[in-house]
Image: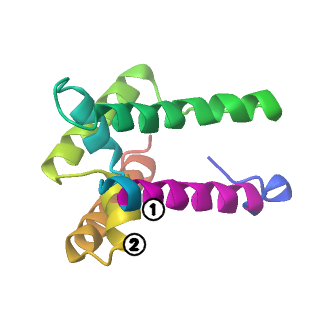
């Protein structure tokens, strides 16, 4: 994977980051809930938990936003350099890591760091380091 520097547009990334921060802030201010996607999604699996309507609306917004973007802009060309087995294994490992770390990248990385949480900082550093090591091993040592 390489970055196409000639067509790099940081403004869309900045606006996206601002929208993520705004939505996470609104969720915590008005509902007292952390916008950790694994926690929100996991809460939906318990149908009698209070606050499931807010969880469902938040998850629906996450799913509908890209569809709305695609209606207004051209779709980017996606190139995935991994097979289906690797993608399924990666998804399972991310899910396991989210449960093991008591949260996911959005809960720890976005919300935890914004609240200056030491636990969020340690979790974010851990999953970033694990990602760096995984890419290095798979791309440079294993030759994938």
Location of mark 2 (residue): 114
Q: Quadrant of the C terminus?
A: top left
Give the residue drawn at x 14%, y 49%: 100
What colour scheme was applied to this rendering of the protein? rainbow
- Give the Cα distance between marks 1 and 2: 9 Å
Residue 26 point in image, percent of width and height: 46, 57
Q: Which residues are magenta?
A: 11-28
Give the residue drawn at x 60%, y 62%: 18
Residue 45 point in image, percent of width and height: 21, 26
Give the residue drawn at x 39%, y 56%: 30
Which circle marks residue 66 in the picture? none
Looking at the image, is 7 positioned above or below residue 18? Answer: above
Location of mark 1 (residue): 25
How many numbered discs, if any?
2
Among numbered discs 1 and 2, the one appearing first in the sequence: 1
Q: Quadrant of residue 19?
A: bottom right
Q: Is residue 110 visible to us here? A: yes
Dot 1 falls on a residue whose secondary structure is: helix
Looking at the image, is 120 positioned above or below residue 131? Answer: below
Q: Quadrant of residue 65?
A: top right
Q: Residues within 10 Å of mark 2 (few under 14, many from 20)?
A: some
Q: Nearer the viewer, residue 86 or 117?
A: 117
Residue 104 point in image, percent of width and height: 30, 50
State left or right for residue 55 relative to residue 22: left
State yes or no: discs 1 and 2 in contact (Cβ < 8 Å): yes
Q: Residues within 10 Å of mark 1 (few under 14, many from 20)?
A: some
């Amino acid at each position: 994977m390489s970055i196409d520097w000639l067509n790099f547009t940081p403004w869309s990334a900045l606006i996206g980051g601002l929208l993520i921060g705004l939505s996470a802030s609104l969720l915590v201010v008005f509902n007292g809930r952390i916008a950790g996607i694994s926690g929100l999604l996991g809460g939906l699996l318990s149908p009698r938990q209070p606050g499931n309507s807010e969880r469902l609306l938040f998850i629906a917004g996450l799913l509908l936003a890209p569809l709305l973007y695609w209606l207004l802009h051209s779709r980017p060309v996606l190139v995935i350099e991994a097979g289906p087995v690797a993608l399924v294994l990666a998804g399972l490992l991310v899910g396991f890591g989210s449960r093991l770390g008591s949260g996911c990248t959005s809960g720890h990385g976005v919300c935890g760091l914004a609240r200056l949480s030491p636990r969020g900082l340690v979790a974010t550093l851990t999953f970033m380091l694990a990602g760096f090591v995984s890419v290095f091993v798979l791309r440079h040592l294993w030759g994938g």
